[in-house]
């Protein structure tokens, strides 16, 4: 049974990168005849933004990405909020501790900071001097009895041998631990797991077969594979999605245009067009075709090729994604959106939907009260491309 998951952290609104991850999870699950879960990774209480789960759900619904299991839907893997799965993480943390794969660390934040600074001054890459690894069993027991706050760390010297990392997009990878923290933290002093422990435990417990997530998690893959090996879990397949960039090569950010899905909803872009744009961006280009052809994936479509969600399910193969970071070009969305509007307008129901949307947009951006055509002062800046597209189409169809 193929099972995937989209696992956002509720730290704000859903961005284009997140929607693209959800889309690729949806496409892969549907293409392989499987299902996907929406899992809320809310173990970082300090970064929790209230209302963001609902916002993410609304954005997925608008886009037509219907998860099979998750909040408001239910399913066999409940609960879908990590904050409600604490006992599970503790059970597995205990087994890591018992097998010597993990140890308790009682160092105060001040001690950790000074140890790190000292290591750095000596030119070391290490982030922790492993002071607590050398505490005797009696000493640990005494500190626990005395209620001293502690965290749980992985003992990186006691990890079973395992295969080197493999990725469906990036291929065979070097097993580099250098960029990782020394003896990474698994449980925090508030008893909540770090992302690393929680995602490995949940992906295993939920029976996830394919993990599709952002490229920013690629450096953590060796650590995750270590955890799979320590816990004696078979790892799933991984695909890390290359980052999307602005036209100047910088990371997508609000300064260069809209990044929140909510902005695209507000401005009236067609949901199918937004998905189409995200899917064709980074779909293997001709330079990658040798690799993609060899692996039996489809060849690259044009960067403005038109696909409905259903067509994407049939055509898209995660293995055909380029491993290079890709520029997301807003002018391509305009071209794609125009085609999607034409398709929507080809049925009476679609025309009604567009008309409704045009009225909503006129009311919002042209300051016209709904259904009356008393035009307010025209603010050219507020006339958005999609408004014009919809209006032109309705007037000249
Ligand atoms: N919670 C992580 C994030 O929002 C997801 C990482 C994953 O999919 O494993 O980036």
Image (cartoon, rainbow, N blue to C red):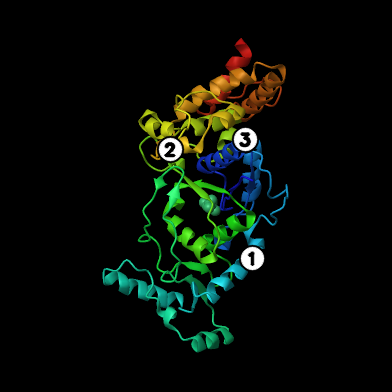
Question: Which disc number belongs to residue 256?
Answer: 2
Helix, strand or loop at disc 3? helix
Separation of marks 2 and 1 at Cα, in angstroms: 42 Å
- In this rendering, the label closer to the viewer, 2 or 1: 1
Query: Residue 90: x, y in percent?
Result: 61, 70
Q: Is residue 301 visible?
A: yes
Separation of marks 3 and 1 at Cα, in angstroms: 33 Å
Tag 3 near tag 2, CB within 8 Å: no
Q: Height in image: 229 above or below 144?
A: above
Image point (50%, 48%), residue name: 238
Query: Residue 248: x, y in percent?
Result: 35, 36
- Badge 2: residue crowd in 10 Å (few <14, some 14–19, many ≥20): few
Q: Is residue 42 visible?
A: no
Q: Which residue is mark 1?
A: 88
Residue 44 lies in what quarter of the image? Answer: bottom right
Tag 2 near tag 1, CB within 8 Å: no
Separation of marks 3 and 2 at Cα, in angstroms: 23 Å
Helix, strand or loop at disc 1? helix
| For residue 260, side relative to residue 114 (left or right) | right
Image point (50%, 38%), residue name: 318
């Amino acid at each position: 049974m193929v099972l995937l998951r989209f696992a956002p952290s509720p730290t704000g609104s859903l961005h284009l990168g997140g929607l693209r991850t959800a889309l690729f999870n949806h496409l892969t699950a549907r293409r392989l005849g499987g299902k996907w879960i929406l899992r809320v990774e809310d173990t970082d209480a300090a970064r929790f933004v209230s209302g963001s789960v609902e916002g993410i759900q609304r954005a997925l619904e608008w886009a037509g990405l219907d998860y099979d299991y998750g909040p408001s839907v239910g399913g066999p893997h409940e609960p879908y909020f990590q904050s409600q799965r604490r006992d599970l993480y503790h059970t597995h943390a205990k087994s890591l501790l018992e097998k010597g794969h993990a140890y308790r660390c009682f160092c105060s934040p001040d001690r950790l900071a000074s140890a790190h600074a000292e290591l750095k001054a000596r030119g070391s890459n290490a982030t922790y001097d492993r002071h607590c690894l050398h505490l005797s069993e009696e000493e640990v027991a005494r500190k626990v009895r005395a209620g001293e706050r502690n965290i749980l760390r992985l003992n990186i010297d006691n990890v079973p041998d395992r295969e080197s990392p493999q990725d469906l997009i990036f291929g065979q990878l070097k097993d580099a631990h250098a960029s990782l923290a020394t003896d990474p933290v698994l449980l925090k002093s508030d008893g909540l797991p770090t992302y690393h422990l929680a995602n490995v435990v949940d992906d295993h417990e939920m029976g996830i077969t394919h993990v599709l997530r952002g490229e920013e998690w690629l450096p953590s893959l060796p650590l995750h594979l270590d955890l799979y090996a320590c816990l004696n879990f078979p790892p799933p397949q991984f695909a890390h999605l290359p980052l999307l960039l602005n036209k100047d090569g910088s990371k997508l950010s609000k300064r260069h245009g809209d990044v929140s899905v909510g902005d695209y909803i507000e401005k009236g872009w067609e949901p199918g067009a937004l998905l189409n744009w995200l899917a064709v961006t980074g779909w293997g280009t001709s330079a990658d075709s040798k690799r993609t052809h060899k692996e039996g994936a489809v060849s690259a479509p044009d960067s403005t090729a038109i696909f409905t969600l259903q067509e994407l399910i049939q055509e898209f193969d995660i293995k055909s994604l380029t491993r290079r970071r890709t520029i997301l070009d807003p002018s391509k969305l305009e071209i794609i959106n125009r085609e999607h509007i034409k398709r929507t307008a080809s049925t009476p129901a679609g025309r009604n939907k567009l008309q409704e949307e045009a009225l909503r947009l006129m009311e919002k951006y042209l300051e016209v009260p709904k259904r009356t055509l008393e035009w307010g002062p025209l603010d050219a800046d507020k006339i958005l491309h999609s408004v014009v597209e919809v209006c032109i189409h309705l007037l000249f169809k």
